Amino acid sequence: MSEKLGILLTTSPENENTHTVLRLAETALAEGRQVEIFLMCDGVYHLNDARLEGLTQKGAKVVVCAHNCLERKVERKSFVLWGSQYDLAVLIKESYRFLSFN
Amino acid sequence: MSEKLGILLTTSPENENTHTVLRLAETALAEGRQVEIFLMCDGVYHLNDARLEGLTQKGAKVVVCAHNCLERKVERKSFVLWGSQYDLAVLIKESYRFLSFN
Amino acid sequence: MKILHIIRDKGHELALSTALAQATDLTQKVALLLIHDAVLTRAETLKGLEVFALKDDVEARGVGDVVRLRRMPLLDYNGMLELIFESDKVIAW
Amino acid sequence: MKILHIIRDKGHELALSTALAQATDLTQKVALLLIHDAVLTRAETLKGLEVFALKDDVEARGVGDVVRLRRMPLLDYNGMLELIFESDKVIAW
Amino acid sequence: MNQVAVIIHKSPFNTLRNSEGLRMAVGLTLEEDNKVTVIFVKDGVYLTGNVAPEKIQSGIIKKHLEALRLLGHRLVVERESMEERGIEEPSVKADVLSSAEVVKILSEADRVIPWQ
Amino acid sequence: MNQVAVIIHKSPFNTLRNSEGLRMAVGLTLEEDNKVTVIFVKDGVYLTGNVAPEKIQSGIIKKHLEALRLLGHRLVVERESMEERGIEEPSVKADVLSSAEVVKILSEADRVIPWQ
């Protein structure tokens, strides 16, 4: 199994974090690494960002905190996994390197 | 015409600005003042916040920057006016006191 | 002329230096209203200024006793609105 | 052990003081990668540390010449990933 | 064991984020290999005081801290940050450690999540 | 005339907000009674340099500044903030004023919008 890069993204698309996470994830995928992104807080607004959907088409796995989506009335999308904090707890343990973008 | 309080709100409901704007607006309305709130940037996410709809029922006028809503794929709601930066330009001139919550 | 600064961030340098500079002009009366985490601003940075704070925001942070010791007037939202409407100019930082 | 600090805010006090404290332990190799507005951090606060910066973020801010004068290595995203994966621990502030 | 340090360093309530960071910290304990230490430093130390977020419709704090303690995880408050702010002791049960000790925890942790 | 001062004081590109603040400043000119002055101070002064936001998919800066100037509004950069950051002169056409002069503009403005 290739080394997995785990990423936590909690800011809205207004933040430069979005660009950095997208570029970093694309580059990692192109290098043949696994990428998993967990969205929570205002990060869940990325469900309406086409660039994130594009990233999943390139092979990234994206999981959201469903609780934060429901709070914000952000609709479920088929390209992301409807998850919970448990998914983050596992990701932070299992990823080879883990980066937080808060 | 009563004195109008103009408010600019540009942050998402994650920010304490939301609570302050709601309480301030409710109090002003109860005192018989006019209140008009302009939402832009992540402030447009308040269209999915029931508390803001409640405020319009108490008499507040709420206008959004439609451009920011379209960018964020935030759906139009009947309780707000679908506006532009021109509405803010007029509000900042016409309100008796103007507060920015950025 | 009465100028009111509403400050939301703790120790907001630009807001405080602007208010202090304006206060040196004696034709201007300058007041600060601390809300949100600005209620935690150190007392020594506020010297020489008339300072109010929003009661709920102070109590939420558990610093009511400290602020009362400094004899800072605590306002409710009616008080906040009164201050806003009686000032000639308001800057909400 | 190699520790990498990825810093996003200009002059991030807590990140810089943590990195400097860790660097005093000679069993640890500490490096900083400046991204976003952190590329504008003053040189004097970075003394004694190995510092990289993300090229695109430097150029976006129009400070490429200044950063090159400081001989700070500029990385692309491949370089950033290499640094992340070769470090034993990464803290993204 | 996967040692995870969560750093809370921003001022308490300007956003709901600190409350969310603590909710995350509690959530991290759902994977039983994770051993969580929440570190309060800089203006984050105010959250270990007698806070009342319900006054401003803000997020839960104390319940999360209690949960972490009951589940056997660790709360740490940096002494220097408390002293600089004139705070004598935390209102919650937590270890008060020096800045040097906090740095050691961060160096030894497998993962560090600075929250902001 | 309604004198409006917009203050840009946060670091340039960590968010899209500075670009949005400038879009707002241009928008304010749509009401012809508004006379707009945009003031760059603290880390906001970097935005008057030779920035290239397209490198990071960030928002428009220069086009907004040009529009404001062409429409007859005013751009001001605080001298002290530039000097502290080792910047010799702005890359855009703007008035470089002292801190005291900036305070005077803020005192005389009918409205002040600090952006962040």
Image (spheres, coloured by chain):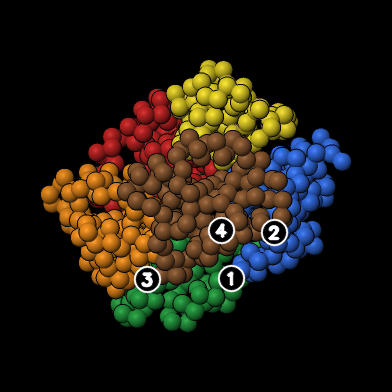
Chain colours: A blue, B green, C orange, D yellow, E brown, F red
Contact between labelled residues 2 and 3, with CB atoms less than 8 Å apart: no
The crowding category of the residue bearing disc 3, from other C-alpha atoms within 10 Å (few below 14, some 14 to 19, many at least 20), is many
C46 in relation to E101, above or below: below
C-alpha gap between disc 3 and disc 2: 40 Å
Q: Residue at x 61, y 67 (%)?
A: A72
Decide which of tag 2 and tag 4 comes sooner along the chain. 2
C-alpha gap between disc 3 and disc 1: 20 Å
Residue D34 falls in image quadrant = top right
C-alpha gap between disc 3 and disc 4: 38 Å
Along the viewing direction, whichever of E6 and B81 lies nearer the viewer: E6
Label 1 resides on the chain identified as: B
Q: Which residue is mark 1?
A: B48
Along the viewing direction, whichever of A28 and E91 lies nearer the viewer: E91
The crowding category of the residue bearing disc 1, from other C-alpha atoms within 10 Å (few below 14, some 14 to 19, many at least 20), is some
Query: Do marks 3 and 4 share a subunit?
Result: no
Q: Residue E30 has which mark?
A: 2
Amino acid under label 3? Answer: Leu
Contact between labelled residues 1 and 2, with CB atoms less than 8 Å apart: no
Q: Element type at marker 1?
A: helix
